[in-house]
Amino acid sequence: MGGDSVRGGISEGPVTAGKVLVCSRCFHRWVARKSDGPPKNCPKCRSTVWMKDYHVCRCYRCNHEWGTTNSEPKRCPKCHSVKWAVPVRNSDAAPRSRFAPRNPMDPEKVEDVLRRYADGESCTTIAISTGMSFSDVYDIVRSNVSDGRIMV
C-alpha cells in the first residue's frame, strides 16, 4: 500500500481514569480524567479521529503527502490521480509515440521515383503505380528537385 499505519491510543480494554491515551495523528500522550468512555477529541490537535488507524500517504504523481483514516484512499486530494500509489515509469525511457517511426527509403525506390518524375509522370501517378504513399513520393521529389514547381 502507499501509506504507513499508526495505531491510536484505545487498544485494550475500556477507558478508565488514569489510563494513558495516545493520539494517532500528533502522537500526543495524555492521561484520561474520566471513566465514562473515550474522549471525543485529542486535547492537543483537536482531532476527532485520534483513536483510529491513521495513514500517511504520498502521491507518486505530484509528491503530495497527506494523512487519512481510510486504509485505501481512492485518489490524491491534490492532483486527483487514481494512480497515486503506482510508481511512475523511469524517466530515462523514451516516450511512446502514437506513430511508428518511418523507415529510411530504399535507394532503389528513390531512384525509380526520380526517374519516373524526370520522364514526366506526376507524383499522383507515380504513387498509384508504385503502391507508395503520395506523401512519400512528394517528399522524395521535393527534396531532390531544385525547381519550385512540382507536378502533383
Image: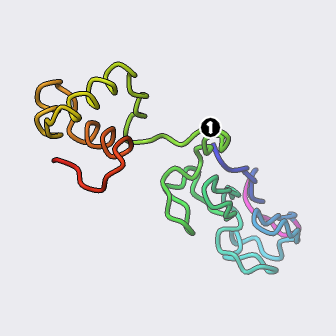
Mark 1 highlights which residue? 93
Q: State the predominant SS element of the stretch in magenta.
A: loop
Amino acid on which the number 1 mark rests in the picture: Ala
User: What residue is at 12 percent from the left and 25 percent from the top?
Assistant: 129
Residue 113 percent coordinates (x, y):
26, 29
Direction from residue 72 to residue 128 in the image, left or right: left
Q: Position of residue 138 (x, y in %)?
A: 26, 43
Residue closer to the observer: 88 or 37: 88
Q: Is residue 13 magenta?
A: yes
Q: Is residue 116 above or below residue 29?
A: above
Look at 26% across and 27% down and name the residue there.
115
Give the quadrant of residue 128: top left
Q: Residue furthest top?
A: 108
In front of the other: 112 or 8: 112
Towards the viewer: 38 or 72? 72
User: Which contiguous range is marked in magenta?
Assistant: 12-18
Q: Is 73 left, or right, of 58 in this rendering?
A: left
Which residue: 69% across, 63% down?
A: 65
Quarter holding the N terminus? top right
Q: Position of residue 6 (x, y in %)?
A: 75, 53
Q: For mark 1, does the 10 Å Cα neighbourhood hold few (<14), some (14 to 19), or many (20 or more) residues?
A: few
